[in-house]
Amino acid sequence: MMTVLTNLSDLRAWLTVKRRRTSWHDWQWQVRNSLEADDLSRLGLISAAAARAARRFPARVTPYYFDLADPVDPNDPILRQCLPDAAELRNGAGQADPFSEARHTPVPGVVQRFPDRVLVHASAFCATNCRHCTRRHMLGRQPIVLPGMRLARVVAFVRASPRVREVILSGGDPLLLSDAALLRLVRAFAALPQLDAIRIGTRVPVVLPMRVTPALARALGQIGRVWVNTQFNHVCEITPEAAAACRRLVEAGVPVSNQSVLLRGVNDSVEALTVLCAGLQRIRVRPYYVFVCDPVTGTGHFRTSRSFARTLARGVATRLGGLAVPRFVVDLPGAPGKVDV
Ligand SMILES: *Cc1c(COP(=O)(O)O)cnc(C)c1O
């Protein structure tokens, strides 16, 4: 945050002023003015222990996303996802890299666990760091495919693997790259006729919807094989701005789907998931997966059991039509794909 604020009422006043400025709608302004651990400490939003947790995994929240929260409600679903928590320091059964992604890296920046799909680390940064992040141990430091030399190696690897028919750009968040860098990357893969889809995994529509500019949406749509997979976890994230970002993509010809993470205290009820999925259908975003939270170090306080997830899955399926019902899945090392709960 560029301005130094020391109490919540000053923060509220600052947000009220900034929300009305055109710069609020400038995604780079949002990134430059993100709240970090020092800001959150100074504002009294996190304890000293939580600030220590943020030394292990940095805190970062866009003003836009923070503005959706009620900062005095400790159970607020937005704050639960973005404020560091002392519980992250507890030694749970978690691991830094439960899926041994490092072992499944044929060339730097690539993870391949399935024969027909490869995941590419396109960016090392996110607009808002999710406290439940699966790749929290590598955010900010993993090898990414840009710049050029590395990208050429990744493209060569995919070309030499004719069974690969889908590339998943992930990270970090690929939409934090500039338009030029992102489009260079997407077009490099789109030039391979073997690929049926280029999937972009991004939380930008949820935490930084102004990043999905009309020009970017149009350019992605013109490529013809781009899909976007985003992550709404709670219905309060479906704001007019987020809905508009998804609409720009859908109307440009980019299918948008959603994978949620099942998070204790955020969305762990049939009611919360039903209204979330109904809300997604209303904005033409297809509910794809609900993930059981991965066993990653520092996320134990979010995790629920597989049998509880199964109960929720049954409840949601009786309340919504099939088009609004996601698959409830768990990621298991060694499985041939995501596994139904
Ligand atoms: C989850 C995952 C995918 C994508 O799986 P889908 O079931 O197609 O969504 C691809 N690669 C890796 C390494 C993954 O972890």
Image (tube, helix red, strand yellow):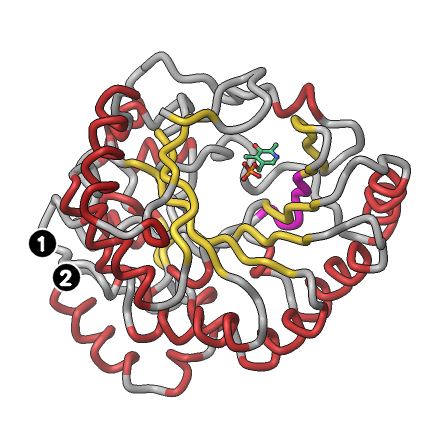
Q: Label 1 sits on what residue type?
A: Val
Q: Which residue was labeled with disc 1? A: 72
Spot occupied by residue 30 in the image (x, y as percentages of width and height): 42, 69
Q: Nearer the viewer, residue 53 or 22?
A: 22
Q: Is residue 311 left or right of residue 215?
A: left
Question: Under tag 2, what secondary structure?
Answer: helix
Give me the disc on residue 8. Answer: 2
Tell me if the residue at label 1 has its CB under 8 Å from ligand 1: no
Identified at 39% across, 87% down, the residue is 22
Kindly indicate the quadrant of the structure image that contains residue 139: top right
Identified at 70% across, 45% down, the residue is 166
243 is higher (above) or lower (below) than 129: below
Q: Quadrant of the C terminus?
A: top left
Give me the disc on residue 176. Answer: none
Give the number of callouts: 2
Q: Label 2 sits on what residue type?
A: Leu
Q: Is residue 307 left or right of residue 246?
A: left
Question: Under tag 1, what secondary structure?
Answer: loop
The magenta segment = 119-124
Q: CA distance from mark 2 to mark 1?
A: 9 Å
Graded by Cα atoms within 10 Å as few (under 14), some (14 to 19) or many (20 or more), the crowding at tag 1 reads few
